[in-house]
Image (spheres, rainbow, N blue to C red):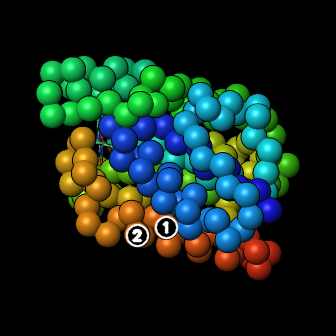
Amino acid sequence: MRAVVVFESMYGNTHAVADEIATGLAGLGEVVVGSTDQIPPTAFDGDLLVVGGPTHVHGMSSKSSRHAAAEAAEADPELDLDENANAPGLRSWLKQLPDGKGTAAAAYDTRINQPTLITGAAAKGIAKRLRRHGYALAGDPMSFLVADSGGPLIEGELERARAWGEHLATRLAAGAPVVE
Ligand SMILES: Cc1cc2nc3c(=O)[nH]c(=O)nc-3n(C[C@H](O)[C@H](O)[C@H](O)COP(=O)(O)O)c2cc1C
């Protein structure tokens, strides 16, 4: 089987989570991980598509929130942009995603370590769009937590990301039913 993990990341945290999910998925067979420009939406070809992005303003990033994130990095010498920060945001990537025809998919985000009611969660919007494009969710939308806006991920989140990848791989290999 072939799995593809696509991420949007301004400060590197969602990117780091993508790498760990990919490691967790390795038992499935071939795994490709890349940012939205490294894996164009029309190029996806596989048995599982995992899509992740940062939570901005309670949901998925927008042009203005990405701009604000870049400006914050410019103003703060301790905040570095991810090498893939200039890649397109997930909204435009998902808009161009062809019909999944029932292919399995999963959504994740990174967000601040507070109750979801306060933070929002981009993964819900990502999952909704994946379903709208004909994908079948292989797991509930998942959040991985950062201590502060620029990170770092709180302790144990990289391990949890790897375990989530393993969980998705197990479900897929067993032909488990998709979640609603
Ligand atoms: C403009 C902006 C808005 C944000 N809004 C939220 C928010 O509403 N809820 C939240 O939990 N985190 C919010 N954050 C923090 C991001 O979730 C955090 O920067 C992100 O998870 C880090 O991922 P990245 O390193 O891959 O960019 C915001 C960050 C920025 C830059």
Asked if labels 2 and 1 touch by Cβ distance under 8 angstroms, the answer is yes
Q: Residue at x 73, y 58 (%)?
A: 30
Residue 51 at x, y percent in the picture: 58, 47
Q: Can you identify the residue that label 1 sits on?
A: 162
Image quadrant of ligand 1 equals: top left
Q: Is residue 25 above or below residue 77?
A: below
* Residue 33 in the figure: left or right of residue 80: right
Hey, what amino acid is under mark 2?
Answer: Glu
Which of the 4 quarters of the picture holds residue 91?
top right
From the viewer's perspective, is 54 left or right of 104? Answer: left
- Of residues 94 and 59, the one nearer the viewer is 94
Residue identified by numbered label 2: 159
The x and y percentages for residue 40 are 68, 30
Residue 47 to residue 159: above or below? above
SS under mark 1: helix
Q: Secondary structure at mark 2?
A: helix
- Position of 177 with respect to 141 (left or right) is right
Q: Residue at 32% x, 69% y: name it.
A: 156
**Can residue 20 be seen in the rendering of this structure?**
yes
